[in-house]
Image (cartoon, coloured by chain):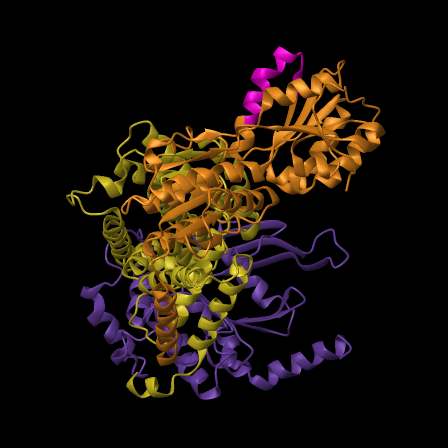
Amino acid sequence: MKKLVSFVLAALMLFSLASCSKSSIPVIGISQYGEHESLDNCRTGFLDGLKGAGLVEGKDFTVNYQNAGFDDNITTQIAQNFAANDVAMMVAIATPSATACYAAAEDKNIPVIFTAITDPVKARLDSGNITGTSDKLPVEAQLDLIRKLQPDAKTIGIIYTTSEPNSVSAIAEYEAKAPEYGFTIEAVGVTAQSEVTMAADTLISKNVDCMSNLTDNNVVGVLAGILEKTNEAGIPVYGSEVEQVKKGCVAAAGIDYIELGKQTGAMAAKILRGEAVASDIPYETISEYGIYTNTPAAEALGIDIPADITAKAIESAE
Amino acid sequence: MLNLIISTLTEGFIYALLAYGIFITYKILDFPDLTVDGSFPLGAAVTAVVINNGVNPFLALLISVAVGALAGLCTGLIHVRLKVRDLLAGIITMTALFSVNLQIAGSNMSIIGIDTIFRLMPFGDMPQIYRKLIVSLILAIIVKIILDLYFKTQNGLLLRSVGDNENLVCTLGIDNGNMKILGLVIANALVALCGSVVCQQQQSFSATMGTGQMVFGLAAVIIGTTIFKKMSFVKGTTAVMVGSIVYKACIQTAITLGLPANLMKLITAVLFLLILVLGNLPSKGGRKHA
Amino acid sequence: MLELKNITKIYNPGEVTEMSLFEDFNLRVSDGEFVSIVGSNGSGKTSLLNIVCGSIPVESGQILVGGKDITHMPEHKRYRNIGRVYQDPAKGTCPNLTILENMSLADNKGKKYLFASGINRKRADFYREQLASLGLGLEDKMNLRVGSLSGGQRQAMALLMTTMTPIDFLILDEHTAALDPKTAEIIMELTDKIVREKKVTTMMVTHNLRYAVDYGDRLLMMHKGEAIIDKQGDEKITVTVPDLLHVFNEISIECGN
């Protein structure tokens, strides 16, 4: 028992040591939901954005980066930690981190900057001392792109995780907008990553003309497995961001998370400098989406990429 | 530093509600109940929906208790009446609840800006962090007292006997199965109550928030009971409340130390093991006083 | 009166390990009778008790108590009128509850277990008295957890607890087998005293031939699902341990041992 007490005391001391390292340089607490290419790119872009605005890490700010390993409970504790340490700003990457930061920052009125949230209005993160950027997919641009590349296509298959809010709202938008472009959407919901390749089989058996990806973590995680099946069946798959095209998707009208992060960083810089307050800045959606194509992948499936698509072509598939 | 301790205590008190539930299933009934990973978000989902529809947040707590009890009833009936193994019965309910939760509240639902139990308490303009501490402390204590009183009733004694000695309960002319079902009902009602409080504290529901709750609860129960193993006068409920706080403190320590984020779970496991081992060592000085 | 009529019990029916234990087995036990049952391993003694208590189902036949058919009554309902003490002392008490709590729990048998206090303070003196009659000093340890008692102490408690409320049958399943000889003797004497006092119909399975001879007013020896010896009244009095041993030896030779 005594040992236990001393252990707990030692832990508490480490606690206080770590929190004593306060200095006059403002700390930015970055709470990221988990390690994931897109989310990592957001963070990298964010830091680039601060740099681009003339702020120097170590001089103008320091970073306390935490990620929750996709555990909702840990997002809460990370946010509480930031609040207790009086960080100058919380940066939340993805929705669970953002709501946790917002709840923890309430008392101290610490500004929260979020990114990689599809629908800030639905998450009720559109008012208060909070702002940021949304990663809502440019669905119409994607539909337009598919129409140009496959003029005869009728159905688009989409696999999505029913518990991922971003995916659910993206599916709703796809279904709403698809008729305008002459498509019908064949959506298959999954609850776990292990079901994704089976869902791909389902879509292939339904003879969809192509498949389109969202930024769905479960689906993107096994993209290679999906592409193996679709390439065999001769079905093109469209991505939702540049990383997916690099991995072998035919094309994407999508987000570049680095760009999104930079945009967020620029907003944060204004707030850190005191030029604006978060509550006065409305959240922003990505100002520019990119069109990316993978020429080898397109050629393999016999798709001609029209010259009028101003593509940042990625010539090699990894 | 003080704020950090307050937040950690708050987390510990709130999750103590869940730990009580696991104490009943795991420690008293000897039933590895995986329903928890589903009934916890169930409580949160129901809370998010009813609060969004203008229901009083305190009433939301009671509604959560009721739906949690139903979830426990399902697992109980599947196990006892349909004779499905304990572990599987819990997995079946948990899996079904995943869909149920999505159906109730979608993949996530925010209640930011709506009054919660923490806001409604008449504490003047006290900051949220203190409100949360006080409210969660009150809840943890009230539930603890109710449970302690219940465990001393005839029915409570019977429940405590079920996990200990099924045989005895049967020879007393009581159906063991019914007592097991009752235990699961109480436990999952508590778990859903915890889900409701967490939802109001985080101001959001997410379909994935139940993942790992069973493991947390087990850890809290084991840490708590190990710490107080040699002090029989400490009640089980008190022990798991402390266990819950210790577990949350471990996580917060890992965060504060800035340990590599991807190693968090591993470090938590090591801290957990350390506490268990330290708790198991015979305390040389302590024995004389005991 | 307990009647077993044309009982057939088959273990693992339909499997390779299928084994028929009872075929058309019949037994009558009159009210107030104290039956001692002996027999080699696998002879069907414990199965007989399990059939009476409903712990195992039967393939065919009837179990009647006072003319009422209880063949399909669930186990826990039968125990409302039956008390049972097992070989394993841990089975009759709850180790995590105190002596007082255990006694209160047993005392409530037959009534509803609701939200009244689990500890019956009014009856505490009665419990103390009962415990004192054991002569084991348990009456001074009412708040001690039963888990810390010895096997003999627990078995004595189990016996008290089982017979505290009115029951029609007392089933003793080798209840002295796990105890040291001296404790076994104490428990056996206590058993006899309680059975005489309460005049409860009793079926006692035992490995101890002397107990079977010395106690009870009827003696059964089971072999392969049949009662090969059934002596009662004056006949029973004349049976001696060597007699029983002799029969045992014959059975063993027959079985090729």
Q: Position of residue C8 (x, y in %)?
A: 64, 54
* Image quadrant in which you'd find residue A234: top right
**Is residue C49 located in the magenta-colored stretch of the structure?**
no
Q: Quadrant of the N terminus of chain A?
A: bottom left
In this image, B46 relative to A181: left or right? left
Q: Nearer the viewer, residue C6 or A306?
A: A306
- Figure check: C222 above or below A253: below
Name the residue furthest front: A54
Q: Position of residue C39 (x, y in %)?
A: 61, 73
Residue C217 visible somewhere in the drawing = no
Chain B image colour? yellow
Chain C image colour? purple
* Image quadrant in which you'd find residue C18: bottom right
Residue drawn at 38 percent across, 47 percent down = A89
Q: Quadrant of the C terminus of chain A?
A: top right
Q: Position of residue B230 (x, y in %)?
A: 36, 77
Q: Nearer the viewer, residue C174 or C37?
A: C174
Q: Which residues are magenta?
A: A170-185
Magenta-highlighted stretch: main secondary structure?
helix
Can you tell which chain is drawn orange?
A: A
Residue drawn at 55 percent across, 41 percent down = B95
**Is residue A182 located in the magenta-colored stretch of the structure?**
yes
Q: Position of residue B87 (x, y in %)?
A: 55, 52
Q: Nearer the viewer, residue B46 or C89?
A: B46
